[in-house]
Amino acid sequence: MSKEYVTKIQNAYRITGTRVSLDSVVYAFLNGQSPESIVDSFPSLTLEQVYGAIAFYLANRAAIDDYLRQGEEEFAALSQKLREANPLLYQKLLTHKKNRAA
């Protein structure tokens, strides 16, 4: 008997039965977080679901890496578009971010 831990809904991968994106789990995993710490970050997930999502990623690594790369490109393009549409707001946000880091 096998379980499906990842579901694709409207071109987005989700952990089956949750609203948590596969992206979130994969990025946490790639950043070195343990499955247990991922569960701590996403309390709606079980340890089994996290391991299942990681196994799905590893079994489909090339396709999921392409999917993640496409998402990053879309985010970068949208960010650029927003910067161009409202440069004053962007500059204020950037200044605020720099001040908080100092």
Image: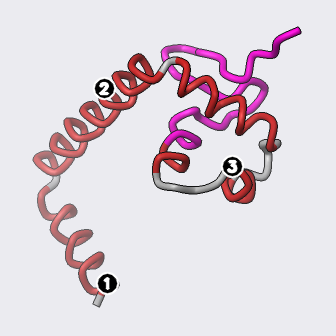
Lower position in the chain sequence, tag 1 or tag 2? 2
Of marks 3 and 1, the one in the foreground:
3
What residue lies at 71% left-to-right and 29% top-to-bottom?
A: 52
* 102 to the left or right of 5: left
Give the amino acid type for the residue marked by disc 3 in the picture. Answer: Pro
SS at badge 2 = helix
Q: Nearer the viewer, residue 95 or 73?
A: 73
Q: Which residue is mark 3?
A: 35
* 64 to the left or right of 54: left
Lower position in the chain sequence, tag 3 or tag 2? 3
Q: Which residue is mark 1?
A: 101
SS at badge 3 = helix
Give the quarter of the image for residue 2: top right
Magenta-drawn segment: 1-26
Residue 13 percent location from the top left of the image? 56, 23
Crowd band around label 2 with a 10 angstrom C-alpha radius: few (<14), some (14–19), many (20+): few
Give the quarter of the image for residue 80: top left
In reply to whether residue 4 is colored magenta, the answer given is yes
Q: Which residue is mark 2?
A: 70
What residue lies at 58% left-to-right and 42% top-to-bottom?
A: 25
